Image: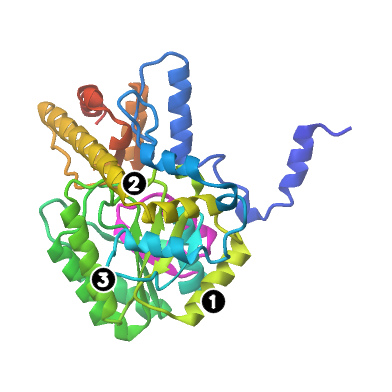
Amino acid sequence: MLEVSNIGNLMLHNLLPSRRDFPADDPIFALNTEAQSRVAKGERIINATVGALLDDNGQIVILDTVMELWRELTPKEIAPYAPISGDPAYLTAMVQRYWPELAYFGTGCATPGGSGALALSVRNFLEPGQAILTLAPYWGPYDTIAQENGAHVETFPMPEPGHAIDALALMEKARNILERQGRLLIWLNDPCHNPTGRSTSPADRAAILEVLRELCHLGPITLLLDLAYLEYAADPAEVMAALQDYARFAVEGQVLVGASLSVSKTLTLYGARAGALVFPWTRDASLQAALAMSCRGIFSNAPRAPQSLVVRLAKDGKAQARLADEHRHWSEKLSSRAQALSGALRKEELPGVPWQGGFFVTLPAKNPTAVAGRLKDRGVFVVPIPQGLRVGLCGLSARDAPVFASAYKESL
């Protein structure tokens, strides 16, 4: 009788050679698991790896308004299949959260979270082997999503705080991609960028959009806004101004503008896996049919229950007001954490961190992996990225900032 381990070795040959050498877990989730394991052993740990909002006691935040609506859902709002492309009322409600002047969602589909929306964009706008363009630094799973859909990520640099974007570098990179592959897909995680916690300035947005205007004659360009953290901004008015800039650009019709939307952070429904890929300023039957085909071929239907909840929320003005209050509270909490971290870093004679919104900030490190390893030895968990260290303000309490800053300085 074969040992289970031997069967495992035999089965490895069934895998394609290109599928045999992946890590056992997503790097971010693996770090979080290690941190939680050390907490369970009684160690004093600061875990700034998580991508979910935690309170000051390390417990996950679940928005009360959302849970009240969830408990009101009826069996018929939960159990049946949703339409293949999603409930149109859900898609419209998702779009109207950010562009309330729009009466309809345009073209789009429901997806399993924002990640599903990103994946579908690759499937429908790039050929195998082609490149996606995005800002650097960027959310690490962009690489995984791209690779799993036969693409890869190329970047242009986010400017340093207080500096203008390098429009010439963007022009050169985007032109190179267009000339090489005849089309361009840009993932732009703005406003409230992960992992820097910053947003483009009006001048930088204008520069990015002008580059796209100048290059669109070279081939079709798709600009996909990755909008995951907008409810957690220092200045909501700045967020709305950015969204209106993108809307005005979209209606020019030179570039296809869409958005990846999610309820994960917005409604603290991470496990519901609900999102949308929408193109609010176009109604195109061919695009709609292509998205429906992708849905059917990959996951068939996105979950019904979160779609039902979003539709209920859109019809309930009192619930919307309560939810806005909750978002405001947690935005202020994130802002206070950013201020506490900046103050603690400055006491250590290090630069502070600019934060305009979202769950994260990025700290500089010349050798991020080595610095993250030394921090881990001191009981502080962060995520190393090529440009530095991603620090989750969403899980870092203000009272932990001095300990964090001291460990960071010692680890550089």
Q: Which residues are magenta?
A: 129-152
> Disc 1 designates what residue?
289
Query: What crowding class fits label 1: few (fewer than 14 Cα within 10 Å), some (14-19), or many (20 or more)?
Result: some
Q: Amino acid at mark 2?
A: Ala
Q: Amino acid at mark 1?
A: Ala
Please tell me in which quadrant of the rendered image residue 378 appears: top left
Label 1 vs label 2, nearer the camera: 2
Query: What crowding class fits label 3: few (fewer than 14 Cα within 10 Å), some (14-19), or many (20 or more)?
Result: some
Spatial CA span between label 1 and label 2: 34 Å
User: Which residue shows up at 31% across the image and 33% down it?
Assistant: 371
Task: Please name whichever residue, 307 or 217, is drawn nearer the observer in this view of the structure.
Answer: 307
> Disc 3 designates what residue?
247
> Disc 2 designates what residue?
319
Please tell me in which quadrant of the rendered image residue 170 appears: bottom left
Q: Is residue 15 left or right of residue 169?
A: right
Q: Secondary structure at mark 1?
A: helix
